[in-house]
Image: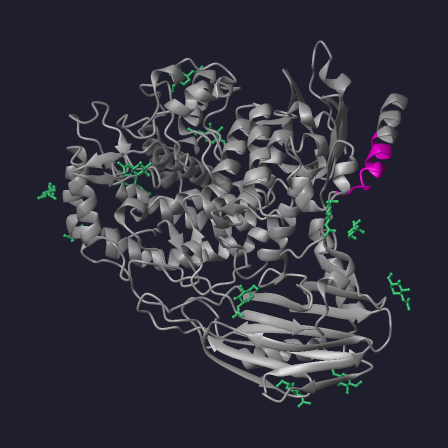
Amino acid sequence: MAFRLLKLAIALTWLANVQVQAATTMWFNKTTIIPIGNGRLGAEVFGQIPTEVLVLNEDHIWSGSINDPSNKNCPGVLPKVREAIWKDDLYTAQSTVDASCMATPLKQQVFQTAGNLTLAFPSVASSSISAYNHSLDLATAIATTTYTTQDGVLFTRTSFASHPDNVIVMKISANVSGKVGFEAKFTTPMDNPKFSVNKSSLSLTARGTTMYTLPGSIEFLARAEISAVGGSVQPGRNGDTLSVSGADLAVIKIAIDTNYMRYDDISGNPEAKVSETLAAVRNKTWQGLRDAHVDDHAGLFGRVDITLGTPTQYSYLPTNFRKNLPGGADADADLFALYVQYGRYLGIASSRKTEPSNLQGIWNQETNPAWGSKYTLNINQQMNSWLSEPLNIAETLDPLWNLISEMAERGTVTAVEEYNITRGWVGHHNTGIWRDSTPIDAAFYGMWPMAPAWLMQNAYEHYAFEPNNIDWVKNVAYPLMKGLCEFYLDFVVVTPKDVEPQEYIVTNPSMSPEKGIGDYNDTNVSLTYGSTIDNSLLRDLFNHTTEFANLLDVDAEFAENLTATMGRLMPLSIGSEGQIREWARDYNPGGCVCCLFSIPHLYLLVDCLIACHSVFTHISHMYPLFPSAQIDPRLNSTLARAANVSLMLRGDSGNGWPTAWRANCFARLLDGEKAYYYMKRLLNSFSYDNLWSKNSVFQIDANFGGANAVAEMILQSHNGEVHLLPAIPSAWASGRVKGFRVRGGFTVDMGWSGGKLEEVVFRSTSGTGANVRYNDKVVPLELLKGGQRTLGILDFEAEHISKMSVLT
Ligand SMILES: *[C@@H]1O[C@H](CO)[C@@H](O)[C@H](O)[C@H]1NC(C)=O
Ligand SMILES: *[C@@H]1O[C@H](CO)[C@@H](O)[C@H](O)[C@H]1NC(C)=O
Ligand SMILES: *[C@@H]1O[C@H](CO)[C@@H](O)[C@H](O)[C@H]1NC(C)=O
Ligand SMILES: *[C@@H]1O[C@H](CO)[C@@H](O)[C@H](O)[C@H]1NC(C)=O
Ligand SMILES: *[C@@H]1O[C@H](CO)[C@@H](O)[C@H](O)[C@H]1NC(C)=O
Ligand SMILES: *[C@@H]1O[C@H](CO)[C@@H](O)[C@H](O)[C@H]1NC(C)=O
Ligand SMILES: *[C@@H]1O[C@H](CO)[C@@H](O)[C@H](O)[C@H]1NC(C)=O
Ligand SMILES: *[C@@H]1O[C@H](CO)[C@@H](O)[C@H](O)[C@H]1NC(C)=O
Ligand SMILES: *[C@@H]1O[C@H](CO)[C@@H](O)[C@H](O)[C@H]1NC(C)=O
Ligand SMILES: *[C@@H]1O[C@H](CO)[C@@H](O)[C@H](O)[C@H]1NC(C)=O
Ligand SMILES: *[C@@H]1O[C@H](CO)[C@@H](O)[C@H](O)[C@H]1NC(C)=O
Ligand SMILES: *[C@@H]1O[C@H](CO)[C@@H](O)[C@H](O)[C@H]1NC(C)=O
């Protein structure tokens, strides 16, 4: 007993020390985009002198309008498509789908910027500025820019996006009275812009642009209300500027709203919404707004602490210098802790209540951004969601559940119109605020009705991490999953005996997203039957839906049918080069014989591999390894080795999200060094100065995927075990985490040093058990709801490990 108390005291002591850390500060000694957001409103704060720019986003400002994009010729041609695929006439299959199944218009509507608020300060020679510091405190979500002018005046700009008060707030102050002066003005590339101004506010109204033949229909209003202490605020001559002069400080409050209510309702009144928002904050002090914002943000952000090693001299460099340290970040492991916290910060800033974070979060400068800055559902949106559960910001997924529910409403019509399937719903590889669910772009990319099954894997995790979420399962997840299963039960087909003697149940058409199989009649095709990701997605969906039906005690016969169908799905198998076979037919594994001799760390033989592999971004056949857990080296080393071969054959790929995905995969293969190699690559090669991730241009998915990979290296919790330090690289010999979540309903605090576990504290939110693995020992743990338990290294060294008692 005394020993127990002593252990507890030790645990509490080191937990108290966890707080002190540099991992929540980013700063720059040059202008750099600092993103702030309240989930709905986003701003890029540039920190420029003399003219500051805030690029503004509101998450419902999209192009075009709703239409019925379905191609109603599709049901008529599906039998022909399937027949061609059985005969391996993939050209006919793909060209038939292109001709008869694709949406009109062929492309989907895009996310658009609201425009800029520019603040023109008196011009100064940049050489006369000193002590410039542009920083972001992740713990308070406040961006600060400070600089001193030649005459010794210290200027400070402080910006935040308040979720509780629904506004973006910027305060501009100087340490000498009467020195604050600037001219504020909106600019926008959007349609039909109108500017107006009065004594205290500046307004812009405009409309989403017409795109791909669909007329722009989102109307929005952006208003900046400016107040000053001392000095004056006055409208400019042209009716579109507001000038502050001779003030001690000025506060700008920005509200933006649209006519969007729902995908099928754009009757909202932006003027009424904005007026109400600004009226509600008019009498609040800056300090009051700031404190409410910090409290709200800290309520989510403050749940997790992470440190990786002791901060070094490098940890105190400007963030862009840390990222570019020669020799990688080995000397500054804490940069990866910052990367985790930044991912969490970005999640909180871009996904609260309204829309989920899209390809660019809510930080888009354009009217026609790369890939439409849409919700891309064949990896990217899923990757955006990975960190939310383990890194303890599960609430940021609420907008995703809403998006899926609304897409399912439209997907019910798509199921009928595109597939002649009269129950359930379907979606394809992209969606947006109009909740489109049809195949777009081209058959090669778009004819993939499996995207929603992948979203439902995320939904299952929401329950796996918190088994208390039963009401949510009942009201949100299960109805969506059941409907999707109904669609797939009608969509799948049995392979003809001359194609597969075992008569498997498969998808047809099917693809391994965006991966060409090869040339058929001089055309690169992707459509075939029974891709590995499709088989694996159906296995997960049917399994999880069955589990939920049992949990809720409903639909017993339906669940039995699902289980029976699941048993006839094509299993994972190994292809001609030792890889996880990507499609039912072992097409084009891409590689050469040398890669067969797969031993751990063969990746170091770079030359061989460069000659061998066919580099490609997507690794969809690794879905069963990560994010799913159907391949697990602890359960089947044959499959795990084959996954390793697949990853080598696929090569490194030159972009952010593929690199982040690979890092997660190697963490799941328990290969910490290789996971670390990809994390360094992500930081060094595919991150901007502000650590935004790159997919040729800024794309946010790898920020989330990379943060999650760090978490996967530290703690895993699939297939019935919580695994401590499963893939820790030697560079992270010591570290501490607090507030990580694991499946089964626990939060976990853990410390390690010298590469070895020190202590781990489990707190149960649901009163379920856990099997806790450290190296080759597994300790069963049972906690009551609210119970807490500390395990030390000795607990894993006992010769005979017995069941731990139930503690509260
Ligand atoms: C910014 O900081 C880096 C690293 O300390 C330094 O090398 C560089 O000169 C600084 N740049 C400016 C403009 O102060
Ligand atoms: C759609 O399904 C119904 C009922 O099975 C069938 O009668 C009809 O022929 C189908 N339509 C097409 C275009 O396949
Ligand atoms: C810039 O500001 C950040 C955040 O306050 C701080 O951590 C950093 O030390 C500052 N840099 C300098 C050179 O003062
Ligand atoms: C304002 O700040 C600057 C830079 O820190 C300092 O040199 C100056 O003395 C301050 N002025 C006043 C009036 O406090
Ligand atoms: C808004 O600011 C960004 C960044 O400076 C710039 O690229 C863009 O052209 C500006 N847009 C407008 C409409 O002024
Ligand atoms: C300026 O316009 C805003 C928004 O229309 C309004 O709320 C405010 O009362 C106006 N102020 C003055 C002084 O007219
Ligand atoms: C703001 O304060 C003024 C003056 O104290 C008061 O007349 C007004 O009703 C207040 N408005 C709101 C929205 O609280
Ligand atoms: C087919 O497309 C894939 C991309 O999915 C590409 O890697 C491959 O090189 C293409 N093949 C041909 C022959 O164009
Ligand atoms: C293959 O391409 C040739 C020439 O482009 C075309 O004439 C032929 O019809 C195509 N074959 C099929 C099966 O479509
Ligand atoms: C179904 O899910 C359970 C719980 O996650 C898992 O243990 C089991 O292996 C899964 N079955 C299949 C066939 O994937
Ligand atoms: C189960 O499958 C059988 C055979 O396909 C079918 O007749 C029955 O309606 C299904 N039951 C449910 C509840 O879906
Ligand atoms: C591992 O998976 C392979 C391929 O599916 C299978 O043949 C083998 O039986 C599995 N081994 C174990 C130990 O389950």
Q: Nearer the viewer, residue 81 or 404?
A: 81
Residue 737, quarter of the rendered image: top right
Q: Is residue 77 left or right of residue 689?
A: left
In the rendered image, residue 611, in percent from the top left (x then y), is placed at: 38, 23
Residue 596, quarter of the rendered image: top left
Q: Is residue 760 left or right of residue 378?
A: right
Residue positioned 62% across, 35% down in the render:
710
Q: Quadrant of the N terminus?
A: top right
Q: Is residue 20 magenta?
A: yes
Residue 671, quarter of the rendered image: top right
In the rendered image, residue 477, in percent from the top left (x then y), is placed at: 48, 48
Query: Which quadrant of the frame does ligand 12 lie within?
Result: top left
Residue positioned 87% across, 21% down in the render:
3
Q: Which residues are magenta?
A: 11-22
Report if residue 719 is visible in the image.
no
Compared with residue 804, is residue 99 higher up or lower down, i.e. above or below?
Answer: below
In the rendered image, residue 358, in percent from the top left (x then y), is placed at: 50, 55
